[in-house]
Amino acid sequence: MKNFQKVHLQDSVDIVRNANGGELLIAGYGSLPNRPEPGLTPISPGWILNYRKEMCIRVTTCRGTSSQPARVAGLVPDTKSRSMCMIAKADGDQQMLLEQLENRELAGMAYDPRVVAVDLMNGKHILAVAFVAAFWHVDLLQEMVTEQANVIAKASGSCGSNREYLDLILDFEWKMFGMVTPKLAALQKRLERMAAGRATRSFMHRKHQVLFAVHETATFSCAKSIP
């Protein structure tokens, strides 16, 4: 882990605690809403301001491998955007929780811990710590939807498939907000079309095999009947 990532984490934690009367709030927008760390209690959906959510980070763990890297969500600065998230409160041993988050989000990953402004569903405005895309990291990518889809369709790792990861994010957004991130939804539709195309090709291939087998059987039967 880069040393300044650790510094950013502690600095961000201190700022958020001071702003929230000692409470440490974490804004999760990718895997955290669906797979939170022990010691994090979800308290409210919210909107992270001035960031857009993209499947822009290459990973070789959890949803991918070194031979088949996956793509996971990252927050990219954009003053005209806001991103759906779940705000969670840190309970219990916060030092242990921070170590867990370091290992999960920062160890070799293209994330940088930052203080973000969040509008909660009830209208309250808060500050929280979010792990945003690190602009300097080699694993922060700029790809077309077709490129991302080709990767996500194949990638899988110890935590499950890359496609499942994307579906879980969109399921969370729909259940909590009644809407989804347009770019991620377009990516999901692309994957659905790819899967439908593969199914059609597989069906046609099996159909061809059956017809060929029937033709061969009929030809053989005719040959036997000729005196």
Image (cartoon, rainbow, N blue to C red):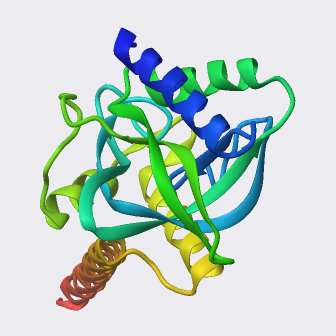
Instruction: Tell me the quadrant of the picture where the N terminus can be found.
Output: top left
Tell me if 17 is positioned left or right of 83 in this view.
right
- Point out residue 211 in the picture as x, y percentages from the top left corner: 27, 86
Q: Is residue 69 visible?
A: no
Q: Residue at x 25, y 77 (%)?
A: 201
Q: Could you tell me which residue is drawn at 38 percent across and 32 percent down? A: 112
With respect to residue 104, does 206 lie above or below?
below
Percent coordinates x, y for residue 70 in the rendering: 34, 43
Question: In the figure, 223 relative to 111: above or below?
Answer: below
Q: Residue 176: in sight, yes or no?
A: yes
Q: Where in the figure is residue 135, as x and y percent of width and height?
A: 21, 37
**Residue 79, how many percent across, how many down?**
25, 64
Question: Which quarter of the picture shows residue 125?
Answer: bottom right
Check the picture and name the quadrant holding the C terminus: bottom left
Does residue 223 appear to the left or right of 72 in the view shown?
Answer: left
Please state if 24 lies on the left or on the right of 78 as rendered.
right
Indicate left or right for 117 with 123 as reference.
Answer: left
- Residue most toward the top? 3
Judging depth in this view, the residue of 213 and 71 nearest the camera is: 71
Res 100 → quadrant: top right
Residue at position x 43%, y 59% from top?
163
Q: Residue at x 79, y 35 (%)?
A: 38
Q: Quadrant of residue 2?
A: top left
Q: Nearer the viewer, residue 13 or 183?
A: 13
- Number of marks in the rendered image: 0
